[in-house]
Amino acid sequence: MRVPRQIAASSAVLGMIAFWAAVPGTAMRAVEQDPTAGPNPAPSAEQVQSFAARLIENQHRNDLALEQFERTERVISHRIGEASPIVPDRTSRIVPSGTGITRFLIEEDGVPVSKEAYRRGLELAIEGLELSLHPNEREREDLAKFEKRRRERAELVDTAMKAFRFTWAGRETRGSQTLIKILLDPNPDYKPSSRLAAAFAHIRGVMWVDESHAQMVHIEADIASEITFGGGLFGKVNRGGHFVMEQSEIAPGVWLPTSSTYDLDGRKFLFGFGVHEKTEISQYRNLGPPARAIEALRNELKILPAETSTR
């Protein structure tokens, strides 16, 4: 069953939070420290504002960098209501196309696709990149839509400073890292400008940030109250939905997602739905702008017959 656009957007809200990193000074307050946290005096208002500016600037930079990085995504999903108990395990290669991405399957349930299917996936990725360099009318329309989504995304990143209150919770050791811990709560004074932004009021989370790099490392978010669409007539997302995301430095100064987990349940009109997925993201490679990416993929295509069907 396809989830309606409005409800699908609510799950995107959770994913977006992982990138919306800002620490407005007016919302900072100290809370009781976690036992694993070391000495951590709260920063001054000036330090907070400077850190927030760095965090936002870095996230915009990460978003732009992602448009030139290919990667591999393994998605393990379970959908509520389906008759089959089988949990799909699919691994795809994601290649930037200039107006989005080209995704093609490389492995399913541990079995690699055929060499022919893999070759066709590479050819489609190259075709998409070539169209971005020499666009037809449809491609120009796709480019306009892509640029609109990019602007909306950038605006949403900036909106976080108004939509959430951020609470300084000290510095906490996670593994070998000492990170800033921040609590995220809806700002009751925030007036949303869209239905998507209105969903912020239902979300609470905790974020851990690398202080020296001003980059998000780990975030956990929950749907604290039911999100309805059309007064509940069109559908809803149930209270209790959960999201976890991690990211790391995959190139100097570039931090991108390495894993995410979604657990959401709700209703589309009269029918229930569930989205329970775990995604592992790896093998990032900077392909550069379309012309350089085309050259790299063509070179790979030339030697493909002598190699296996997966990377």
Image (tube, rainbow, N blue to C red):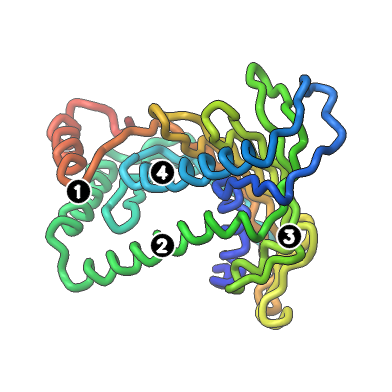
* Residue type at tag 1: Ile
* Residue type at tag 2: Arg
Of labels 4 and 2, earlier in sequence is 4
Q: CA distance from mark 4 to mark 2?
A: 13 Å
> How would you rate the neighbour count of disc 3 (Cα within 10 Å): few for under 14, some for 14-19, many for 20 or more?
some
Q: CA distance from mark 4 to mark 3?
A: 26 Å
Residue that mark 2 sits on? 151
Residue 282, x across and y down, in percent:
44, 33
Check if mark 1's residue and mark 4's residue have beta carbons within 8 Å. Answer: no
Locate residue 208 relative to residue 258 in the image: left or right: right
Say which residue appears at 58% left-offset and 72% top-offset: 6
Using the rendered view, name the quadrant where residue 172 is placed: top right
Q: Which mark is residue 126?
A: 1
Residue that mark 3 sits on? 187
Q: Identify which residue, 95 or 173, lies in the foreground.
A: 173
As helix, strand or loop, the secondary structure at mark 3 comes to loop
In the picture shown, does residue 144 fall above or below 14?
A: below
Q: Nearer the viewer, mark 1 or mark 4?
A: 4
As helix, strand or loop, the secondary structure at mark 2 comes to helix
Quadrant into which the N terminus falls: bottom right
Say which residue appears at 59% left-offset and 68% top-offset: 196
* Residue type at tag 3: Asn
Q: CA distance from mark 3 to mark 1?
A: 45 Å
Residue that mark 4 sits on? 61
Of labels 3 and 1, earlier in sequence is 1
